Image: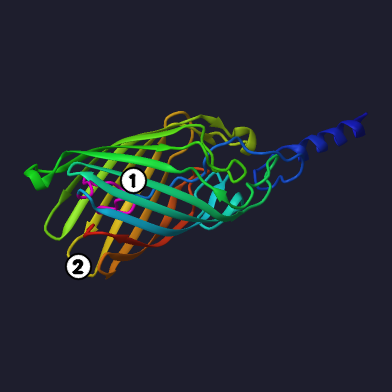
Amino acid sequence: MLRTAAVAAAVALFSLPSSAHALESGPKGPLPMFDLQRLRLDPGSLGSLVVGTGRTLAPGLLRVGLNYHYEQLPMHFQTRWEPGDGTGLVENKMTAHLTVGYGVLSWLDVGAELPFILMQGGKPTLEYLPPRSGGLATPWLSARAALLRQTTGAPINMAVALTAGLPVGSRAAQAHEDYAWHPRLQLGYVGEGFQVGGEAGVFLRKRHDLRPVSYVEGDVVGNELRLGATVTSRGGDVTRGEVSVVAGVPLQGGRVGAELLIAIRRHALQGLDLYVMGGPGVGAGFDTPTIRFVAGLSWSTGKVD
C-alpha cells in the first residue's frame, strides 16, 4: 500500500509542468491564431522609422521602402527578462517588409505595409507546435491627417492616424488577425537641428488566452495601449541618427513589453536612403523579442527628411 502511494506521488510530481521550456512531450496542435509581429514601420518615416511625429508627406511625394527584419526569440515563455537566453516556439525569425507612403494633400497622407516571413524556427512547447516557416503576414493600410502644422504657424505638429490590418495573413505562419485596428494621436516638434515626437494609441484585436500553453499568468494576447517616443537628429546633410522607444501596455491581461531602437540613416544618392536600426526588447512579454534588427533602403520622389 505504501509502495503504491509512493509510486503515484512520484508520477504526479514528475508530471507537473515545472516550466514551458522543460516539457516538449505530448500531443502537438496549432496555437491560438494571432499575428505575432509587433513592429509597424512608418511608411512616411518623417523623423522616425517606427514612431510618428505628427507630420505628413508633402502632396504628390511618394516613398517606397524595402526592409530586411530579424528577430531573436519573438515568442518565448520566460517569466523574467533574460536577454539572449531561453528557448521558444519561435527562436529566430526573418521578415521582408515592403512599405509605400504617399502624400495626398498638404494635411493628409496614406500608406501601406506588406510583410512576408522569409523563415522562422523554434521548438515544440507543451501541446503546441512552432509555426510553419514562411508566408504572407498581415498587410497594413494607414491614413494620417494633420491637425496642427508648424509650417502653417502652429507651435507643434499634431496628427491623428489610423492603421488597419487585412485578415489575409498566413495562419500556418502565425501571421493572421481576424481584425486589427490601431488609432493613435501623434505629436512632434521640429527644432534647429533636432526633432522630438511621440504617439499614443490603442491596438484593438481579438483576445486569446495562452496560459494553457505556458502555465504562466499574464500570457494573454489582446487589446493594448501602444506608446512611442523618438528623438532624431536633423543636423547632418548626409547621415543622421534617431533613438526611439516603443511600448505595449496590456488592457485585457498580459505583461508590459518595451523596445529601445537606435537607427542611423544615410542619404546615399538623390532620393535614395540607406538605414539600419536595432535594439533590445525589455520586459517579460512573451511576444517581445530579445533583439530586433532592421536594415533597409528607401526611394522617394522628393526630400522626406
The residue depicted at 59 percent of the width and 52 percent of the height is 134
- Relative horizontal placement of residue 16, taking residue 294 as reference (left or right): right
Check disc 2: other Cα within 10 Å, few if <14, some if 14-19, many if 20+: few
Spot occupied by residue 264 in the image (x, y as percentages of width and height): 31, 64
Q: Is residue 186 magenta?
A: no
**Amino acid type assigned to the residue bearing label 2 in the image:** Gly
Q: Is residue 50 magenta?
A: yes
* Helix, strand or loop under label 2: loop
* Helix, strand or loop under label 1: strand
Query: What's the magenta region?
Result: 44-58
Q: Quadrant of residue 118?
A: bottom right
Q: Quadrant of residue 5?
A: top right
Whichever of labels 1 and 2 marks the residue nearer the N terminus, that label is: 1
Which residue is the site of mark 2? 236
The residue depicted at 55 percent of the width and 31 percent of the height is 208
Contact between labelled residues 2 and 1, with CB atoms less than 8 Å apart: no
Spot occupied by residue 185 in the image (x, y as percentages of width and height): 26, 37
Taking the image as drawn, is residue 146 in sight? yes
**Amino acid type assigned to the residue bearing label 1 in the image:** Gly
- Relative horizontal placement of residue 194, taking residue 282 as reference (left or right): left
Say which quadrant the N terminus sits in: top right
Which of discs 1 and 2 lies nearer the camera? The answer is 1
In this rendered view, identify the residue nearer to me: 298 or 59.
59
Spot occupied by residue 117 in the image (x, y as percentages of width and height): 54, 52
Outermost residue toward the front in this view: 60
Which residue is the site of mark 1? 111
The residue depicted at 42 percent of the width and 42 percent of the height is 140
